[in-house]
Amino acid sequence: MSGPGPVFGNLPALVIAGGGGGGGSATDGAANGGGGAGGYRSTVVGETSGGNSLAETLNYNVLGSQTFSIVVGAGGAGGAQLNYRQGINGSNSTFSTIVSTGGGGGGAPSVGNEGGSGGGGGYLDLGGSPSPGQGFGGGGGAAGIATGAGAGGGAGGVGANAPSDTVGGAGGAGIASNITGSSVTRAGGGGGANSGSGGAGGGGAGGSSSVGVAGAANKGGGGGGGGLRAGGNGGSGVVIFAVAGGFNVSFSGGVTQTSATVGVNTVYTVTETDPGSTVTIG
């Protein structure tokens, strides 16, 4: 007689990609856009994914054992202090079937890159578009050389256009989650060059005749645009998931993670992985 078939439940998780790097330029160049936040996808009931989207569902067999692929994306490099260097997009993060797209690099001075959230545009340029269900687009830059640049989009809000020809746009806000037992905001966009503030949730501020500030590590924050200097690096992503107490959880080699008890669940925060990393639950 065969045993019971699989019974599926939702596995609560956050999957956040690496943030995009801010644009960079030489001292005689123009203002550069902030990097977009890494794509933000949630399967936590009652919370949201990026771009004001509903939480998704990640099925797992509560009666058996399953192995999932797991990848934590790196942040993208900020553009170098050379003649107009676009910020580099962040790398994707993956947990099972959930893939979050790396944040878009900031323009230098050019249109911001598309990404999980879009990168900000340089002077006179538009921000990049976001990935659906993962974040918001970047803001556009103002007219003129060495002036305000657009900000990177965040998971929870658009990157602002440069408000004037002397001030950069503010990075888009991230999203707060309680999966770890307390409210933490992640995936903020990078500010545009000329002192645009970084978005709540780890976005780096834009530089003013200075290097852009890096996005926060393991929050997927976008890097700030360089103010006639190099752009800030994007922050690395993270994968966080919760399982009911009593389940066995084992990781392959090369995974850096911590765990904590939150109510009846054990919550795992994965901050670094090697190629081909997996986790087995059950």
Image (cartoon, rainbow, N blue to C red):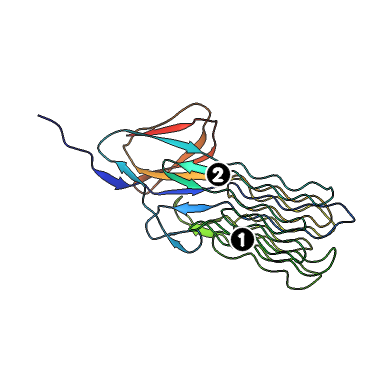
**Helix, strand or loop under label 2:** loop
Q: In the image, which disc is placed on residue 92?
A: 2
Q: Residue at x 70, y 47 (%)?
A: 233
Residue farthest left in this picture: 1
Which residue position is annotated with label 1? 153
Is the C terminus in the top left, top right, bottom left or bottom right quadrant?
top left
Q: Quarter of the image holding residue 160?
A: bottom right
Which class describes the residues within 10 Å of circle 1: few (<14), some (14-19), or many (20+)?
A: many
Q: Position of residue 68 (x, y in %)?
A: 40, 36
Is 83 in front, or is 38?
83
Q: Are marks 1 and 2 in contact (CB under 8 Å)?
A: no
Q: Position of residue 6 (x, y in %)?
A: 23, 39
Decide: is 193 above or below 270: below
Left or right of 80 in this view: 217: left
Instruction: Work out which residue is located at the far bottom of the displayed protein and give it.
Output: 164
**Residue at figure coordinates x 59%, y 43% from the top left:** 91
Dot label at residue 42: none
Count of numbered circles in the view = 2
Q: Tell me the SS state at disc 1.
A: loop
Callout 2 environment at 10 Å: few (<14), some (14 to 19), or many (20+)?
many
In the image, residue 174 sits, relative to residue 78, either above or below, namely below
- Residue drawn at the location 58% of the way across and 46% of the way down: 218
Toward the top, the furthest residue is 253
Which amino acid lies under the numbered mark 1 shown in the image of this protein? Gly
Distance of mark 1 from mark 2, alpha carbons? 16 Å
Mark 2 residue type: Asn
* Quarter that holds the N terminus: top left
Horizontally, is 139 left or right of 61 in the view? right
Residue 119 shown left or right of residue 275 in the figure: right
N-term mark: 1 or 2: 2
